[in-house]
Image: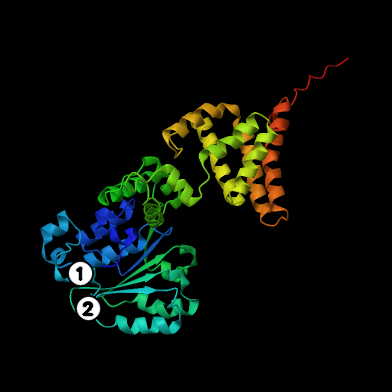
Amino acid sequence: MSYQVIARKYRPAKFSDITAQEHVTRTIQNSLRMGRVGHGYIFSGLRGVGKTTAARVFAKALNCQKLMEDPEYLQRVTEPCGECESCRDFDSGTSLNISEFDAASNNSVDDIRALRENVRYGPQKGKYRVYIIDEVHMLSIAAFNAFLKTLEEPPPHAIFIFATTELHKIPATIASRCQRFNFKRIPLEDIQKQLQWICDAEHITVEGDALQLIGRKAQGSMRDAQSILDQVIAFSAENDHEGAISYQGVGELLNYIDDDNMFDVTDAVAAQNPAKMLDVAQFVIRNGYDEQDFLEKLVEHLRNFLVVQNLGSTRLVERPDAIRERYLRDAGNFTPFLVMQMVDFLLLTQKELKFQFEYQFRFELALLKLIDIVHIASSAVTPAAVVQPQKKKPLTSH
């Protein structure tokens, strides 16, 4: 049997398995209990957060025979049983009641007309025919218009579930006829827990910090995190500790810029040390890191300083405990005003670097400029923005 990637092997089969989207799954389960199932749904959100998975579980539940025949199971469990004929057909990919379309490659008027003709026919088994249309924003305007009448007055057996990463591209005439659910970015902690559960199931030893690094790289996408984990497992297969996954190994594979490099920048700024700053710039260039990516992570690094300075704690800093302690320790090296000045400069530099020649020199110059910003601000008595106007003396008559 061919290898099945982690993202498919551990794809949720029940509502309760879908991570961090309780606001969606609870609403859908309540609609099933109450028998208030709509005819059109739009699932929107970042890639890899569970939109299509939720649509598939919902479609499976709609025709589950146990949910239809057992009122107590419907009210108490409200999950597809996975054992009835309809659920087995769905799992094996032979169900005729559920159709999935990719709007990116089937986006013409003719494709929608064919779908519209197909909608007229009722289900062979069960109660509903469910149409899942992925990346629906890729449909042409003409295709949307051709679909409008069907969506406005659908047959009672037809349910449409649209998934999209770009909700703003869907015409209002379509969106207003559907129930809309916005899927949240998955929190880092939830991604880390899921990856740990997968590693335990696969009997793989892994460091907690390594999973956190994978989660940060995934930026809220569970599928991205699982794909990265697949790469990391293959990369770590030759480790001495039976394929153990380490933080260092993950960083090496992902070519990830370590937090220590970020602290090297702020340490050089605090110490007014241009030689150390140039060493950091050379490290980035010599190791082939992307300069734009480095500046982006430097902005995030300074954001963490602002969080600590304003909250007095690291509860919103998604880093290992040792790094959090360092943020607490170093936050006093700068005022919030200086940190915001550096962030403003870096955001402007990111835009300018895209169109500049002599890229390496511009990058070095940008890092050196951070020292200059802090030096100028520190040498001033008070920032101009906070200088208080002098009070005028009252006029006296002679």
Badge number at residue 123? 2
Residue shown at 42%/68% (left/top)?
Answer: 135
Q: Is 105 drawn above or below residue 285 in the view shown?
A: below
Q: Is 141 drawn above or below residue 363 in the view shown?
A: below
Q: Is 32 drawn above or below residue 195 in the view shown?
A: below
Residue 296 vs residue 335, the one in the foreground? 296
> According to the image, label 1 marks what residue?
63
In the picture provided, is 57 more to the left or to the right than 207?
A: left
Residue 284 vs residue 286, the one in the foreground? 286
Residue shown at 17%/55% (left/top)?
Answer: 77
In the picture provided, is 391 more to the left or to the right than 309?
A: right
Q: Name the amino acid type tagged 1.
A: Asn
Location of residue 86 in the rendering, given as x and y in whole percent from the top left corner: 18, 71
Number of other residues with Cα within 10 Å of mark 1, as a class: few under 14, some 14 to 19, many 20 or more? many
Q: Quadrant of the C terminus?
A: top right
Location of residue 356 in the rendering, given as x and y in whole percent from the top left corner: 71, 55
Residue shown at 19%/68% (left/top)?
Answer: 87
Location of residue 383 in the rendering, given as x and y in whole percent from the top left corner: 70, 30
Residue shown at 40%/81% (left/top)?
Answer: 112
Q: Is 286 drawn above or below residue 333 in the view shown?
A: below
Is residue 219 in sight in this rendering? no
Is residue 16 in sight in this rendering? yes
In the picture provided, is 152 more to the left or to the right than 273?
A: left
Q: Name the amino acid type tagged 2.
A: Pro
Q: Secondary structure at mark 1?
A: loop
How far is disc 2 from disc 1 in space, using C-alphas?
A: 10 Å
Residue 308 vs residue 360, the one in the foreground? 360
